[in-house]
Image (cartoon, helix red, strand yellow):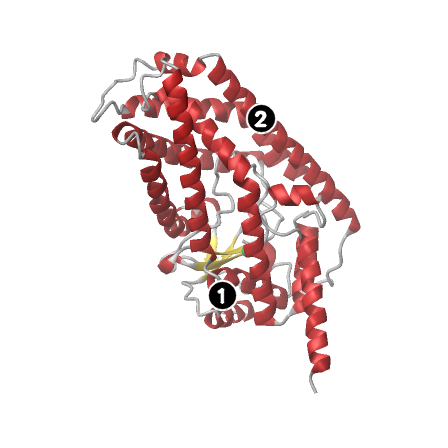
Amino acid sequence: MLIRRSTRPAYARVQPRYPRFTAEAADPSGATPAPEREPSPLEPATLDATRQAEARRYARQRQTLSLISLCLTAALVTIFLFTGLNFWLRDALAFVPAWSPAWGWQPARIGAYALALLLISIVLSLPLDYYSGYILPRRYGLSTQTPAAWARDELKGTALSLVFEIVAVVAVYALLAVSPGLWWLWAGLGMLVFTVLLANLAPILLLPLFYKLTPLPDNDVKRRALALAERARTRVRGIYAMKMSEKTTAANAMVIGLGNTRRIVIGDTLLDHYTPDEIEVVVAHELGHQVHRDIPKLIGMQTIATLGGLFIASLALDAILSADSRYFGLADPATLPLLAVALGIFGLVTMPLVNGVSRWIEAQADIYALETTGKTDAFISAMTRLANQNLAELEPAPWIEFLLYNHPSIGKRLAMGQEYAAKQAAGAAARP
Ligand SMILES: [Zn+2]
């Protein structure tokens, strides 16, 4: 990714809105190539002070909304656990067949429990989701969607998340029933397999559900991207334009997929508003992630974090179950809220660490882009355009950046580009 996704809190439901991983196979047959774009003369990039003031206001509002959403989640969970609602829900679902293929694992009951819990949380968070996901971006001119189009996307994303989450819960409860001591290890390894599979398949299965993708025509941008890919010794299976303008005015680009599904995807919002040099630097940044093997690195990091979270959750579950006789065992559906809370707290506590690693990875990709293209001016002007276009706050408060940013702030990236330019100039002056 080139820039951070619209801030959805990490604890919120996962939606493949701007997926980090996506896939492709061969070019989808019948796809019509995007029309050749006439390079339009672009204004030189200068930082827009009005947009920056708006960006600061927008950031404050989003952060406040995230905090409200976090507090609501915490309140809901507290009510659920401390009033015994988790047992009430279990007993209310007693009409679901208790069919148990192994060791007290009741897939139908745990599936129904997970569905009920997820639906409650979806319904309760809907007003806030609508406000932060649609009203606010619309107010700042970032969203180009109609309410109906937004709702369709939301429905698709929610349905997908529901299916993934319920399958995951039912599988984890099989492990809880069969291997009470080591379930967390098997669950973590299962997550790893699933993540690799999803990273591979998302570009073919998920991304096209949300965006129209068309192969880039043989133009200057495509030739430059292919030359960069060759230099990076990265085999890409196609370069695609993604019709982001149907949903947003913000620009982005990504290299997605693993192995034979790897492809470069560039938003039409980027293709239309940036110079070929600027697009080249952006594509070089994306290829930097490939050269540095960042996707396997991130998957590895995520697996370690997941294993840590699951292990701590297993300790917490053991402690609570030995003290509370209302649970009939680890595989009791009523333990699901406990498990969710333990994993949620672990995710929140480790978020700054995960974001810190991500910022470091992103800075390395920027350095790669500068070194391979040598186009420092294009890098600086691309970052300036991004700050204006995406309403990215140039200099967020350091603690906000530390906690929430998975990319360095644009201010830091601009400073890095300027530093690199100064070094370049000094190097050129030193040469005879
Ligand atoms: Zn990146």
Q: Residues within 10 Å of mark 1 (few under 14, many from 20)?
A: some
- Disc with the residue nearer the chain's start (2 vs 1): 2
Residue 373, percent from left and from top: 59, 71
Q: Amino acid at mark 2?
A: Pro
Identify which residue, 89 or 360, lies in the foreground.
360
Question: Relative to 308, does residue 96 appear above or below in the rendering?
Answer: above
> Is residue 41 visible in the rendered structure shown here?
no
Question: Relative to 88, does residue 396 appear above or below in the rendering?
Answer: below
Residue 40, percent from left and from top: 66, 65
Residue 73, percent from left and from top: 54, 25
Label 1 beta carbon less than 8 Å to ligand 1:
no
Task: Say left or right for 380 vs 30.
Answer: right
Ligand 1, by image quadrant, is: bottom right
Question: Relative to 209, does residue 424 appear above or below in the rendering?
Answer: below
SS for dot 2:
helix
Total residue callouts: 2
Residue 340, percent from left and from top: 44, 28
Task: Say left or right for 174 vs 358.
Answer: left
Residue placed at 68% from the left, 37% from the top? Answer: 139
Q: Quadrant of residue 431?
A: bottom right
Q: CA distance from mark 2 to mark 1?
A: 42 Å
> Is residue 14 visible in the rendered structure shown here?
yes
Identify which residue, 356 or 25, lies in the foreground.
356
Q: Amino acid at mark 1?
A: Pro
| The C terminus - image quarter | bottom right
Name the residue tied to disc 1: 217
Q: Residues within 10 Å of mark 2 (few under 14, many from 20)?
A: few
> Residue 127 has which mark?
2
